[in-house]
Amino acid sequence: MPERRDTLLYLDGVSVAFDGFRAINNLSLVLKKGEMRAIIGPNGAGKTTMMDIITGKTRPDEGEVFFNGDIDLTRHDEADIAMMGIGRKFQKPTVFESHTVEDNLVLALAGPRSIFPALVHAGSRAEAARIDDILETIRLAERRHDLAANLSHGQKQWLEIGMLLAQDPKLLLVDEPVAGMTDAETEETARLLRDIATTHSVIVVEHDMHFVRELGVKVTCLHEGSVLSEGTLDHVSADDRVIEVYLGR
Ligand SMILES: Nc1ncnc2c1ncn2[C@@H]1O[C@H](COP(=O)(O)OP(=O)(O)OP(=O)(O)O)[C@@H](O)[C@H]1O
Ligand SMILES: [Mg+2]
């Protein structure tokens, strides 16, 4: 394990049981500052539960969970952790359908981690520039005045990622972003996340191996609540244990 103080996220020996069943079992995982990591693994491997632990939704029974080297996340609740800069995207998009794309971002900018002081009210130049920036990143500049309801499923996912970006997170957790997307949207999502990863740390959980290959980042395969294999996608997908429990399905 690297020195904890140099890491963005540091999990060591983490376990959590639900009614005696160990969903997370002595899990150790380290994310460097600025890193994007892909997490794969079979259904029930503990991928979402790991995100629940990082975001304070679930408290581990054992183990260490540190953010930014020295913040003990097990001592904080979900609201605190969101304020510290850990943003999470759940699988189902939760955009405001009856608002425009732009207004969704305006609402998100005013959220709890707003970098805009109360005095800088809606419509300020800084805010407009930030919105333009995010719209470019999420490939929705042309759709800014459309109602969110009229976006495709994939575009709604991108808008929600934009709403997370508006909160200026240090770490983004994204759970199965391309489920239900078209092939073209899936490929664009890989590019979009690679763009975001130039300025943010990211953890992406996904089952779509084509997408994971497009991300081109280090991969961790979870199984029964622990790390089964870790490394390049080529390394992990050549691992016999990974083939047996996951890829060979
Ligand atoms: N709050 C909870 N209460 C009881 N059991 C839970 C809870 N959360 C997760 N589990 C169980 O823990 C195990 C891990 O679930 P988890 O959702 O983390 O898997 P996953 O890797 O995200 O799977 P998938 O790929 O299907 O999303 C499962 O057996 C699940 O039923
Ligand atoms: Mg899951």
Image (cartoon, grey):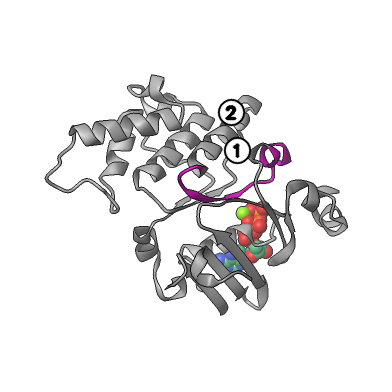
Up-down: is 194 above or below 146?
below
Up-down: is 211 above or below 45?
above
Q: Residue furthest left?
A: 119
| Residue 201 lies in the magenta-colored region | yes
Read off the residue under disc 2. Answer: 185
Nearest the eye: 132 or 70: 70
- The image quadrant that residue 166 belongs to is top left
What crowding class fits label 1: few (fewer than 14 Cα within 10 Å), some (14-19), or many (20 or more)?
Answer: many
Numbered disc 1: secondary structure: loop
Numbered disc 2: secondary structure: helix
Image location of residue 217, percent across then percent down: 65, 46
Image location of residue 84, percent across then percent down: 36, 61
Q: Which residues are magenta?
A: 198-213
State the residue at coordinates (79%, 51%).
235
State the residue at coordinates (57%, 78%).
63
Nearest the eye: 203 or 217: 217
Nearest the eye: 40 or 199: 199
Left or right, residue 117 beside residue 171: left
Amino acid bearing label 2: Glu
Read off the residue under disc 1. Answer: 178
Image location of residue 197, percent across then percent down: 51, 44
**Is the residue under label 2 in contact with that under label 1 (CB below 8 Å)?**
yes
Up-down: is 50 above or below 92?
below
Q: Earlier in the sequence, mark 1 or mark 2?
A: 1
Instruction: Confirm or reject: label 2 Cβ below 8 Å from ligand 1.
Output: no
Is residue 170 visible in the rendered structure shown here? yes
Amino acid bearing label 1: Val
